[in-house]
Amino acid sequence: MAIKINIYNQKAEVAGEMELDGKVFGVPANKNLVHQAVVTQMANRRQVLAHTKDRSEVRGGGKKPWRQKGTGRARSGSSRSPIWKGGGVTFGPNRDRNFSKKINKKMRQKAIIMALSDKVASGNFLVMEKLDIDSYKTKIFNKIIEGMEKVLNKNLKPEAGAKKTGEKAEKLSKKFKRSVLIINDKKDEKVKYSGRNLAGAEIINLENINILDLLKYRDLILTVDGVKKLEERYK
């Protein structure tokens, strides 16, 4: 089932309409599958930093401290023994640990589709006609994002008790910090460097779409070409 949605230009004005494919942007969520995809990606990103040296890696200790018999002390073969001060560590963490996990390609793609569908269903999804700026200007890019946020904030649901106090949606929107993920359909250095210093905003290319970024940021902005490419990829 197709989903109708407005298309906005960079001035946050309605520039037309388009239909989203229900097979990509209208899929009900499966929490277990999404959780598995998130855990897998986080595990594969994990860096193994903790490392302790065992007795073979600690420097020194090649000479036997004293002769085997006749000293009255316990026998010892190396000063790098784990029972010696400055010796190796027994059963300590090491860099050879592997935390990576595997997930089927179709399962990972399905989780991404569910995250996209949730953005559409919750009203945190916006389609831009194009995303293009002429110069490396954070101020210009920020102005574009502010316009898009005003459109997205209209979809915010009023909190409990808001009607009683007469609190408007505009005031409610101020309570939310910026949290927006922008997915560009092409590599654009001007867009990348103009928006990388904006707090609460993340810009990625379509090739780098992943479940963690989709869940981390509240709002999602896509271009028309980006929507079409996603539909072709996941349909």
Image: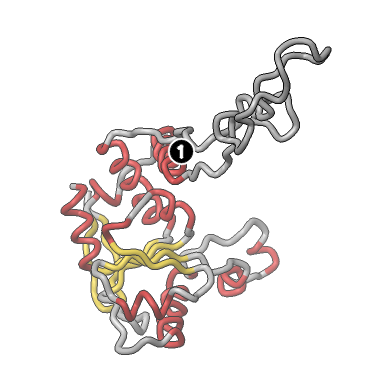
The colour style of the image is secondary structure
Image quadrant where residue 219 sits: bottom left
In the image, residue 201 sits, relative to residue 146, either above or below, namely: above
Q: In the image, residue 199 lies at what x, y percent?
A: 53, 72
Q: What residue type is labelled 1?
A: Val
Q: Where is residue 217 in the image (x, y as percent from the top left)?
A: 47, 59
Res 29 quadrant in image: top left
Image point (44%, 84%), residue name: 138
The residue under the point 30% across, 48% down is 26
Q: Left of 89 or right of it: where is 198?
A: left
Front one among 181 and 98: 98
Relative image position of residue 125 (x, y in whole percent):
38, 62
The residue closer to the viewer here, 235 or 66, is 66
In the drawing, does residue 207 fall left or right of residue 200?
left
**Residue farthest to the left, as pictured:** 232
- Residue 54 falls left or right of residue 231: right
The residue shown at (26%, 75%) is: 129
| Rendering coords of residue 218 (x, y %) | 48, 59
Looking at the image, residue 136 lies above or below residue 55: below
Crowd class of label 1 (few under 14; some 14 to 19; many from 20; radius 10 Å)? some
Residue underneath mark 1: 39
Residue reaching furthest to the right: 72
For mark 1, give the secondary structure: helix
Q: Residue at x 51, y 42 (%)?
A: 48
67 relative to 197 in the view: left or right: right
